[in-house]
Image (spheres, rainbow, N blue to C red):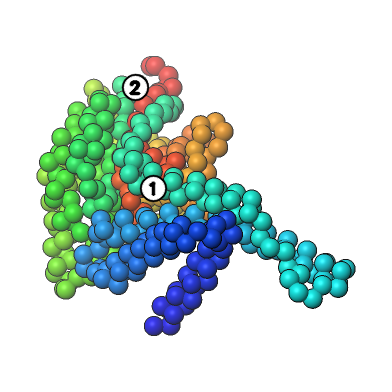
Amino acid sequence: MLRWIFIIIFFSVFEFYAFQAIKTITNNRSILLVYFLIVALILGNLTYHSLIFDRSIGFTHYFGYALGLFLSLFVSQLCIISFLFFEDIYRVIQGIYDYFTYNLTDDFIPERRKFISKIALITGLIPFSSLIYGMFYGRYNYKVLKYSLTFDNLPKEFDGFKITQISDIHCGSFDNKEKVKYGVDLINEQKSDVILFTGDIVNNKASELIPWIDIFKTLEAPSGKFSILGNHDYGDYANWKSIKDKEDNFNLLLKSQKEMGFELLLNQSKYINKENSKIAIVGVENWGEGFKKKGDLNLATEKIIKEDFKILLTHDPSHWEAEALNHDKLINLTLSGHTHGMQFGIEIPGIIKWSPVKWRYKQWAGIYNRGKKFLNVNRGFGYLAYPGRVGIWPEITVITLKSSMPTI
């Protein structure tokens, strides 16, 4: 109850402050009423869906849209309030100066300036429109990102071997089969040798995957399709009536992945053979700082040797520096996901790459390397919570392996 009182007080003050920009510009009652109704509907909608939220069901599309609209409004108003706050600092300083300089006793605090409020509103419209755009277009705006990486211990037979990595499908968030099918067709168009999925196929429950099996089972790769689990795949974020229900959910997820044609690696490794050479695909269960740590890299690599070329699938990129980077079996290439790039940011190749998620994860999107060891953090195929993407688009990664191994 105390929490709700705090929330009500906070948003009452927050909304009152943001409203001052509108009030400064116009006293038109119709405009003020429309603004009030929009704010009330957005806040009321989120409050309603928060109150009826059922953890045994998890995020619904309705809750996602309610959250998305709220974030659009909140970020917009935050921009507006920032302008008003700095203007208020100026107004107070100016008022105090005038009070002591001119001995004013009434109305010594200057009024708000209309042009500042107009700038604040225009600035606030930028994130508002961007977040709305991200909800209706950005979330299915699939991008294919291509890289070529060279290794001196990659067998010559695998020179030019092509990998497609996808991650964080979160199929429980999808609501458009045509758009998802387009993304899957785009994966197949890459004609990669192998498809590797790095976890979080659902939000909370395996049942979310059932309507999408027929689409994802059409993925094709001659050397196979391999997958691992992410933190959302264990059912830890849903309420279960019994331990057995949770176990049944997990078994259904394993069965569904098999039906899709994926070979799920649970702290295991698998060789891909080509002529007289081979490379190892190593897959660990989820291991992340602040999350479940079921991944066992030593167990996963016990059947392979240091000299093998190895590709590690691990959902959380924090695992790279924590264990994979200096592992005694020498992990050549690590593929991760998890961060989603926070589904929000600015990326202009060669100029800027920024997202708030960088304050949580050192490696959060794209290629990183330490010497001859590489990490790719996929930005995710799907989305979670906020039902959209702005600047950080859903990603299909294509990596071509190149060998610098001398010919014998």
Question: Residue 184 location, x and y as percent?
Answer: 23, 35
User: Does residue 137 appear to the left or right of 273 in the view shown?
Assistant: right
Q: Which residue is mark 1?
A: 132
Q: Which residue is mark 2?
A: 160
From the viewer's perspective, is residue 280 above or below residue 27? above
Name the residue type under label 2: Gly
Question: Residue 364 location, x and y as percent?
Answer: 46, 46
Mark 2 surroundings within 10 Å by alpha-carbon count, few (fewer than 14), some (14 through 19), many (20 or more): some
Q: Nearer the viewer, residue 208 or 157?
A: 208
Quarter of the rendering containing residue 260: top left
From the viewer's perspective, is residue 211 above or below residue 26? above
* Residue at screen point 23% across, 53% down: 172
Q: Nearer the viewer, residue 300 or 79?
A: 79
User: Does residue 164 appear to the left or right of 116 in the view shown?
Assistant: left
* Residue at screen point 39% across, 83% down: 1
Q: Does residue 296 appear in the picture of this structure?
A: no
Q: Earlier in the sequence, mark 1 or mark 2?
A: 1
User: Does residue 125 appear to the left or right of 154 in the view shown?
Assistant: right
Nearer the camera: disc 1 or disc 2: 1
Q: Point out which mark residue 102 bears.
A: none
Question: Residue 239 location, x and y as percent?
Answer: 23, 70
Q: Does residue 23 appear in the picture of this structure?
A: yes
Quarter of the rendering containing residue 150: top left
Q: How many marks?
A: 2
Question: Residue 145 location, x and y as percent?
Answer: 39, 31
The span from disc 1 to disc 2 (Cα, nearest Å) is 41 Å
Name the residue type under label 1: Ile
User: Does residue 371 appear to the left or right of 66 in the view shown?
Assistant: right
From the viewer's perspective, is residue 351 above or below residue 208? above
Q: Which element carries disc 1, helix, strand or loop? A: helix
* Residue at screen point 30% across, 72% down: 51
